[in-house]
Every structure is written in C-alpha cells, then in structure tokens.
C-alpha cells in the first residue's frame, strides 16, 4: 500500500457529500476545512476532528463517537499505524521550509497530547498496513486497541523524550518513491475524473493498431502479466511489471513521468483493473490495450521477443564449470543481510546507476528475492539493448533453500574486535 490519488472528487460528485479536510489544508477545489475539535454528525453518531500535524501539517485523525457518547474508534490516517507512526519526511518534498526533524517534533506532540490520552479500549483503524512506504515498521495486523499500541508501539513509549523520538522515527528511512510528492499535489490540486481515465484507457487495439500506436507515439509498452509468462514471449521493447506483485511502487519508481503515455498488455479480462490501479497512483494516460492480449499479437505473426530464464539447479550447474557474473538486484540492505558469494549488487531501485556497471558483451545471471524484481530489471535493460541477461527464477529464496551455493552473511564490524 502506498500514497494513492484519492477518489474524493469523484465520490463527492456522485454522492453529493462534501469533502472534509483537517486544519491547514488548502485544496484547489471546494471542501469543508474542519477545525480542531469540531464534531461532524453522521446519523446518530459523531466524528470528532483531531488535528495531528507531523506526517504532514494538515494530518488529521477522526474519532468515532456512538449515539451514547462512547468513543469507540480512531481513524488515525497516516499519524498512527499498527506498530509504527507516519514518516515525517514526505511533506518537506512539497513545502521546502519544513524539515523532517521539525515534522517529527510536531508528530511527537500530536501523539502525546492528542492521541495517547484517549481511552485504551478505542480501536485504531490506520490508513495503511504492512508494505506501505508511509512508515518503516508496520505490522501485518490491520487494527488494534490503542491500549495495546501504547504497550507495543516503539514510538509510543511513555518515557520517550522528544529528542529520542525524533532520532528513532527518522533513523532508517529509505527514499520514498519519486511519485509520492506528485500524488500529494494531485490530491491538493485536483485531477481528471476516473471515468475519463477509464474511457481513454479502454481503447481496444488490434495487433496492427497496437503496433502503429507503439511506433507513432512515445508510449511505453507495459506488460503486467506474470514474470515467467512474460519471459516466454512478449512484444519487443515491453517493460514487465506484474499486476500481482508490488505493482504501484514499482510503476512509480520505474516510470518517473506520471504523464507518460502507456500502452497495455495484460491478461485478458484484467484491462480495467490495471488502468484503475495505474490511475490510483497518478498514471492517467493509458491510451489503449492489446485486444486479445499477447496471444493475439503472436497469432497475428508479429515479432516476438523472449528473455532466457533458468532455475537455480541450472545456475548451479553453470557455476560448477567456472566463474560467472551474477547480479543481485535486491535493495542494498537485503544484499548486506545475506547474498550469494561473489554476486554483484545492482539494486533495481537505482537502475540507471546500476546499468552503467553492465558490459553489454558479457553474460549476466540476474536474481532478486523471488523473481519479480529481476524480470522488471531484465525487461528494462532488454528494451535498452542489453541482450545477454539471464533471469534466475525463484531468486535468492530458491538459491538459499537449494543448499547448492555459498552464501555470504553480513558480519557487524563490532564482532570483529
């Protein structure tokens, strides 16, 4: 889960319900800017607005109060997660006068003064869960009592000083995907209706029309099928980012321009799903999809490309014959934790830097953790003329489980003293 383009404009238009923002919000469209402590009536229940700056300056939590006046649920947004709190370094991408330390300080005050005094039996409903880049230590659990979070969440320790909080919350933050600030601005300034986005993207193109569009526009061909299915055959120059993996963050990381025109190759019947999920992270310019999918392209006799993919048994057999070039495209932190001996780390998330280290005339065996990222890496480089990359399906998981390889584990320097 990531920062998404909100559906508030479409939802408000279709239902007539007003859009509500917390204090300090300055949207470019009509909305109710609520005051701290204001209560909104929903039937017999009430929702109290609790302004909690820190993740952003307008961050707000909403406390649900039932008809008897009992506080029963906290919709905590990006302020409080299960096991974590919102990262304080994103708003500075939008407002230059903010620093992450300043925001972390605001977040400390918000949590201590506004959230922690609430009753322990209140149920917390955060905006994101495990896997989101909006925090660094989120639990896979989606709800919890506030009392349990006070006991278990590192950022809610009762004896924690503000200086300690700032240090712990800001330590270990990785760079957010490049599209995050762009999505924030779309949510503030407004965006095109999802109905129009779907209408534009739902152009069903025959293989001939698809080929013409690819040749006559600057559109990127995005193939969202399973990585191993993609490897066996694809439209030349396609980029593979599988819809059933971490689709949104890798689209955001690999396609820097959210206005990039996109042509889709998908599993039949999943075209609308892909167009919608692209739009949710700001990519509104899908201009059509290949009718009948890749099978139709192949039946039409069009040119087909492939990426060689081998399993770890084949890799082991090749390595027994002599040294080979192995590329590990996982994050550097994953590589440092443990990796195949003599493998070179060229992370996917900095692919343009990684590419500079690859000799087009040499053969490389490329793996990630499980095979998803390595195919993204291989497809992008294949489209740029790197023809000697071999994918290792199953990735490091299979490499380690096979017991056929020497694995190097990270040793903390202090243990060598």
Image (cartoon, rainbow, N blue to C red):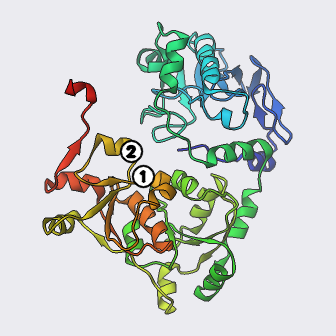
* Mark nearer the N terminus (2 vs 1): 2
Q: Quadrant of residue 57?
A: top right
* Identity of the residue furthest to the top in this view: 159
Q: Quadrant of the C terminus?
A: top left
305 on left or right of 287 = left
Q: Residue at x 57, y 62 (%)?
A: 273
* Identity of the residue furthest to the bottom in this view: 301
Q: Quadrant of residue 405?
A: bottom left
Q: Residues within 10 Å of mark 2 (few under 14, many from 20)?
A: some
* Identity of the residue furthest to the right in this view: 30
10 on left or right of 338 = right
Which one is nearer the viewer's eye here, 128 or 211? Answer: 211
Which one is nearer the viewer's eye here, 99 or 11? Answer: 99
Q: Which mark is residue 332?
A: 2
321 on left or right of 24 = left
Residue 167: where, in percent of width, then height? Answer: 50, 20
| Image: 188 above or below 241 | above
| Image: 61 above or below 117 | below
Residue 40: where, in percent of width, then height? Answer: 76, 25
| Image: 275 above or below 172 | below
72 on left or right of 322 = right
Q: To which residue does mark 1 refer?
A: 347
Q: Residue at x 75, y 18 (%)?
A: 36
- Residue 121 visible in the picture: no
Answer whether labels 2 and 1 touch (C-beta < 8 Å): yes
CA–CA distance in space, label 2 to label 1: 7 Å
Is label 2 in a helix, a strand or a loop?
helix
């Amino acid at each position: 889960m990531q920062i998404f383009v909100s559906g508030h404009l479409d939802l408000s238009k279709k239902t007539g319900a007003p859009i509500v923002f917390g204090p300090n919000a300055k949207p470019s469209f009509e909305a109710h800017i609520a005051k701290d402590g204001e209560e909104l009536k929903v039937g017999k229940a009430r929702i109290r607005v609790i302004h909690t700056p820190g993740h952003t300056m307008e961050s707000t939590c909403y406390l649900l109060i039932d008809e008897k006046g009992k506080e029963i649920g906290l919709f905590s947004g990006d302020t409080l997660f299960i096991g974590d709190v919102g990262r304080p370094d994103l708003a500075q991408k939008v407002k230059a006068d903010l620093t992450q330390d300043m925001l972390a300080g605001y977040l400390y005050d918000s949590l201590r003064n506004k959230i922690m005094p609430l009753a322990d039996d209140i149920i917390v409903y955060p905006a994101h869960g495990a896997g989101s880049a909006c925090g660094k230590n989120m639990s896979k659990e989606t709800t919890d009592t506030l009392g349990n979070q006070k006991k278990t969440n590192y950022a809610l320790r009762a004896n924690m000083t503000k200086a300690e909080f700032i240090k712990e919350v800001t330590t270990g933050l990785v760079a957010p995907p490049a599209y995050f600030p762009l999505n924030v601005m779309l949510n503030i300034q407004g965006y095109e209706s999802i109905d129009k986005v779907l209408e534009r993207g739902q152009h069903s193109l025959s293989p001939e029309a698809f080929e013409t569009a690819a040749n006559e526009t600057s559109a990127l061909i995005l193939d969202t099928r399973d990585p191993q299915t993609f490897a066996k055959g694809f439209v030349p120059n396609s980029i593979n980012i599988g819809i059933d993996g971490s689709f949104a963050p890798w689209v955001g990381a690999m396609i820097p321009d959210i206005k990039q025109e996109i042509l889709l190759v998908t599993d039949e019947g999943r075209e609308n799903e892909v167009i919608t999920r692209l739009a949710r992270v700001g990519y509104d310019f899908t201009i059509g999809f290949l009718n009948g999918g890749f099978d139709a392209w192949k039946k039409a006799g069009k040119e087909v490309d492939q990426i060689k993919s081998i399993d770890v048994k084949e890799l082991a057999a090749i390595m027994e014959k002599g040294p080979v070039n192995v590329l590990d495209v996982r994050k550097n932190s994953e590589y440092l934790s443990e990796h195949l001996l003599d493998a070179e780390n060229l992370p996917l998330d900095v692919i343009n830097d990684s590419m500079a280290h690859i000799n087009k005339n040499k053969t490389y065996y490329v793996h990630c953790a499980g095979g998803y990222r390595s195919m993204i890496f291989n497809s992008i480089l294949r489209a740029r003329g790197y023809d000697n990359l071999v994918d290792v399906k199953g990735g490091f998981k299979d490499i380690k489980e096979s017991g056929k390889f020497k694995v190097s584990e990270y040793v903390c320097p202090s243990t060598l003293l």
